């Protein structure tokens, strides 16, 4: 059996060496591993590497990239020493057993070192065994620098090449790579720089770039003139395009003769892309119709495009350095401004619609989007804003919304009116004769009760006659079976309760008639309490299963000018919404017993009539509250809400009746709508 020396740091028990096993083999293995000289052992047959000692590994493969099992002795010989190795060193050692002389070794990066080599030949110990060459090499050391006494030029060069992020390469006279750094290997998708040795740019790039690079390098070799900071477009076989800023200079030997080229390239692809992106962005900014502005982190304007002037009327010189707030004015919604301010203060994006002012003082609706810009460390540096004049769209939306709301209100009132009138008519007739019959029954039963009392008296008198005892006993038995005393009490009670129920039906019918009776479009002073009571009665089927309705009406409230039809619809919408909110709250809180509560209040507040409708429902979330009066906005399930109820409320009260609508709400507790109607109107007709 034989042992061989590992290419890893020495561990005696695992050493592998092509000598006979035994104590002396281990001693020699230790000595070889610790020797100050470079020791290389290879097979004679194919010059395949068998062993490198510690010093050899440190000098020739310092980072352990090489797969020694696949390498040959020629891979570690200097370019000009390969012929010397084959024609002199190995031939002489094979014949004479030993050769000694000076040659060059090459590390896996392509750097060469001058060494004094002693090469010995070792024959196989057994027939058919493996014969080996053993090289022992000592570097030829020149006078060391005082400042870097322990560092060789090769080590410094290696550290420099592997530390710099730029691509560094050396090429021979034929533009073949003879040394590259790891950065260039990484750029080519290779694990080791040695994989590029001997290749040219024609092996890496398309002919478009490779030919240009080759021509430049050959011109440098011919003329000795360098190329400094030249931008090169690299075209790769897979279609990629990269850009580098390259400096290429002639590579000279100690005698000053040009022996190739040296180059260093810095990848500027991202910079070129950024420049191209900026160029395209500049073109885009000049061509788009939206206004674009850029501010610093304190929202002072740094730049605007031409469209910004077209929208706002301000020249660039007038706005540079100003805060974005200069477009705001008296009619700008404070809440929107505060929302925008909070977003920008938090470094987040803002998107919204805001009323702004032009240079000439006129207003325009601005669809505004502002986004934060951050540097590589995540720090806020700028804001970019896009503004678009949507005044025409807002005007059309407002007109369409008002028209749609008015149309829907008219259609709803007409439909409800027809339905209510029909229902009232159908109910009124049978209710009337049922009521009449109930009165007849009450009167008739009162007379019948008199007869029954007289019969009772007669029964008592007959009971005194023995010959009538049997008949009297039979009569008493019948009275007991029919519970005549109970019937005499409960039948009148039942009839009176029926009359009370019929009275309630009559009141509902009357409310339906009043609710459905078409009113004219002019404001007339009305009893607001009575109108609200009518709406409460009509909507009872919506709230009776989930809530009780409590009224707190002011008895001193004067008549209030309004259009009854429209105000009826407002109260009806608010009562229905309150019932739905309470129903949702009861589902969320199933453990709570009882019903919710809807409270309706009226009172006078100076020159205004105040109506409050309060519910114990779910409340309105903060993100929903700003949108509740928008047409078609709803949070209800499909089929349960159209998004028009509160839009109608706002339109009727604010626009048609010159009033106000305010909301106070607490999520989980409920909501109160505050309606304010003027006691006097500036016009007799709301639709003139």
Image (cartoon, grey):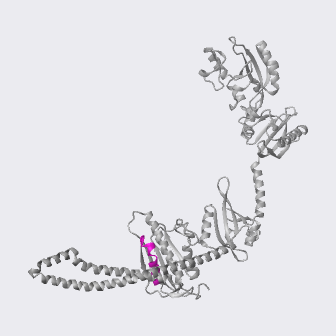
Residue lying furthest left in this view? Answer: 466
Quarter of the C terminus within the rendering? bottom right
In the image, residue 263 sits, relative to residue 687, either above or below, namely above
**Coordinates of residue 153 in the picture (x, y in percent):** 76, 33
Quarter of the N terminus within the rendering? top right
Residue 147 visible in the displayed image: no
Residue 3 visible in the displayed image: yes
- Magenta region: 529-547
Q: Where on the picture, by quarter, is residue 292?
A: bottom right
In the image, residue 606 sits, relative to residue 356, either above or below, namely below
Near-viewer residue (205 or 252): 205
Tell whether position 645 is magenta: no
In the rendered picture of this protein, how many numbered marks are placed on residues?
A: 0
Q: Main secondary structure of the magenta part?
A: helix
Q: Left or right? Give the position of 164 relative to 221.
A: left
Q: Where on the picture, by quarter, is residue 277?
A: bottom right
Q: Where on the picture, by quarter, is residue 15?
A: top right
Residue lying furthest right in this view? Answer: 223
**Coordinates of residue 71 in the picture (x, y in percent):** 72, 26
In the image, residue 45 sits, relative to residue 253, either above or below, namely above
**Coordinates of residue 386 in the picture (x, y in percent):** 70, 65
Near-viewer residue (263 or 334): 334
Q: Left or right? Give the position of 408 relative to 327.
A: left
Q: Left or right? Give the position of 550 relative to 211.
A: left
**Coordinates of residue 434 in the picture (x, y in percent):** 37, 82
Tell whether position 533 is magenta: yes
Near-viewer residue (397 or 181): 397
In the image, residue 460 sits, relative to residue 16, either above or below, namely below
């Amino acid at each position: 059996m034989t042992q061989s020396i590992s290419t890893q740091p020495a561990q005696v028990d695992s050493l592998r060496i092509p000598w006979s096993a035994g104590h002396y083999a281990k001693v020699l293995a230790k000595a070889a591993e610790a020797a100050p000289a470079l020791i290389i052992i290879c097979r004679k047959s194919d010059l395949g590497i068998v062993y490198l000692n510690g010093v050899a590994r440190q000098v020739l493969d310092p980072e352990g990239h090489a797969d020694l099992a696949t390498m040959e002795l020629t891979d570690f010989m200097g370019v000009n020493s390969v012929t010397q190795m084959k024609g002199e060193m190995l031939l002489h050692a094979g014949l004479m057993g030993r050769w000694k002389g000076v040659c060059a070794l090459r590390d896996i990066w392509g750097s060469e070192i001058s060494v004094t080599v002693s090469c010995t030949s070792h024959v196989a110990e057994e027939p058919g065994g493996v014969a080996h060459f053993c090289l022992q090499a000592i570097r030829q050391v020149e006078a060391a620098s005082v400042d870097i006494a322990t560092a060789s030029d090769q080590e410094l060069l290696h550290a420099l090449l592997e530390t710099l992020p730029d691509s560094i390469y050396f090429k021979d006279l034929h533009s073949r790579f003879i040394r590259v750094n790891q950065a260039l290997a990484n750029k080519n998708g290779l694990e080791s720089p040695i994989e590029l040795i001997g290749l040219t740019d024609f092996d890496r790039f398309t002919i478009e770039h490779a030919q240009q690079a080759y021509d430049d390098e050959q011109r440098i070799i011919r003329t000795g003139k360098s190329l400094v900071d030249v931008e090169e477009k690299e075209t790769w076989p897979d279609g990629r395009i990269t850009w580098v800023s390259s400096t290429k200079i002639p590579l000279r030997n100690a005698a000053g003769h040009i022996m190739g080229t040296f180059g260093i390239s810095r990848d500027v692809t991202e910079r070129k892309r950024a420049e191209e992106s900026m160029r395209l962005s500049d073109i885009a900014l000049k061509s788009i119709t939206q206004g674009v502005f850029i501010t610093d982190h304190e929202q002072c304007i740094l730049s605007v495009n031409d469209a910004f002037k077209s929208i706002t009327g301000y020249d660039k010189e007038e706005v540079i350095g100003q805060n974005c707030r200069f477009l705001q004015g008296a009619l700008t919604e404070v809440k929107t401004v505060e929302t925008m301010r909070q977003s920008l203060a938090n470094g987040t994006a803002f998107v919204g619609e805001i009323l702004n002012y032009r240079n000439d003082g006129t207003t325009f609706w601005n669809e505004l989007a502002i986004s934060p810009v951050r540097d590589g460390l995540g720090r806020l540096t700028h804001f970019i804003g896009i503004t678009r004049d949507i005044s025409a769209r807002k005007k059309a939306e407002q007109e369409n919304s008002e028209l749609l709301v008015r149309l829907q209100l008219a259609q709803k009132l007409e439909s409800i009116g027809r339905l209510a009138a029909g229902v009232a008519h159908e109910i009124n007739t049978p209710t009337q004769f049922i009521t009449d019959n109930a009165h007849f029954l009450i009167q008739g039963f009162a007379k019948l009760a008199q007869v029954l009392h007289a019969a009772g008296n007669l029964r008592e008198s007959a009971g005194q006659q023995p010959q009538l005892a049997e008949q009297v006993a039979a009569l008493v038995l019948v009275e007991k079976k029919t519970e005549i005393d109970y019937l005499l009490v409960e039948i009148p009670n039942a009839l009176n309760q029926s009359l009370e129920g019929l009275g309630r039906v009559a009141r509902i019918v009357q409310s339906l008639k009043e609710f459905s009776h078409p009113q004219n479009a002019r404001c007339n002073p009305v009893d607001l309490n009575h109108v609200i009571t009518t709406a409460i009665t009509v909507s009872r089927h919506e709230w009776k299963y989930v809530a009780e309705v409590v009224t707190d009406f002011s008895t001193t409230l004067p008549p209030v000018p309004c259009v009854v039809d429209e105000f009826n619809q407002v109260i009806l919408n608010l009562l229905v919404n309150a019932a739905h909110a309470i129903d949702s709250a009861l589902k969320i809180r199933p453990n709570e017993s009882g019903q919710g509560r809807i409270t309706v209040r009226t009172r006078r507040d100076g020159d205004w009539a105040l109506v409050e409708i309060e519910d114990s429902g779910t409340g309105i979330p903060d993100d929903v509250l700003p949108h509740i009066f928008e047409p078609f906005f709803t949070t209800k399930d499909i089929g349960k809400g159209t998004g028009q109820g509160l839009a109608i409320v706002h339109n009727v009260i604010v626009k048609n009746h010159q009033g106000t609508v305010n909301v106070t709400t607490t999520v989980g507790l409920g909501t109160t709508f505050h309606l304010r109607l003027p006691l006097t109107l500036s016009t007799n007709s709301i639709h003139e």
